[in-house]
Image (cartoon, grey):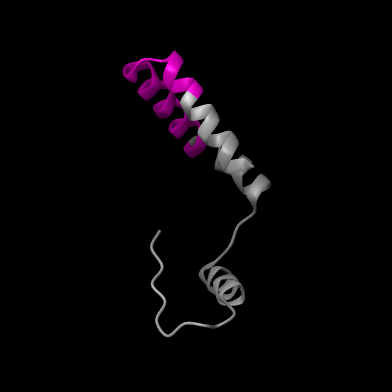
Amino acid sequence: MKKFFHNFLRTAVSLVLTQESGNSVRVSLYKFKNKHKWIFKLIYGTANDEDIFNNIIQKLDGKFDILMVHS
């Protein structure tokens, strides 16, 4: 549902805004996100490398030989 809403919103915005104004909004959101990181940490929490690795292992049930993770 979250992905559907995200795609819907992107499509609606792209129909209304020009490429230049869309880029301006994107830059503004990027600056806001970097300036107010504490808000996103409060909402989504934080994780270290070990937490992320253990979560991946748990979700994949250990059924792999080689695991490559890109971020």
Residue that sits furthest to the right in the current view = 42
Q: Is residue 41 above or below residue 15?
A: below
Position of the C terminus, as image quadrant, is: bottom left
Between 66 and 42, the one lying in front of the other is 66
Residue 19 horizontal side relative to residue 9, left or right: left
Name which quarter of the figure residue 40 lies in.
Answer: top right
Name which quarter of the figure residue 56 lies in.
Answer: bottom right
Position of the N terminus, as image quadrant, is: top right
Point out residue 49 in the picture as x, y percentages from the top left corner. 51, 69
Residue that sits furthest to the left in the current view = 20
Residues in magenta, as a range: 12-34
33 magenta-colored: yes
Q: Which residue is located at x 55 percent, y 83 percent? A: 62
Point out residue 44 in the picture as x, y percentages from the top left corner. 64, 50
Q: Which residue is located at x 67 percent, y 45 percent? A: 43
Residue 59 horizontal side relative to residue 21, left or right: right
Q: Is residue 3 above or below residue 22?
A: below
Between 23 and 47, the one lying in front of the other is 23
Point out residue 41 in the picture as x, y percentages from the top left corner. 62, 48
Residue that sits furthest to the bottom in the current view = 65
Q: How many marks?
A: 0
- The rendered magenta stretch, by its main secondary structure, is classed as helix
56 magenta-colored: no
Q: Which residue is located at x 38 percent, y 72 percent? A: 68
Between 65 and 44, the one lying in front of the other is 65
Point out residue 18 in the picture as x, y percentages from the top left corner. 36, 15
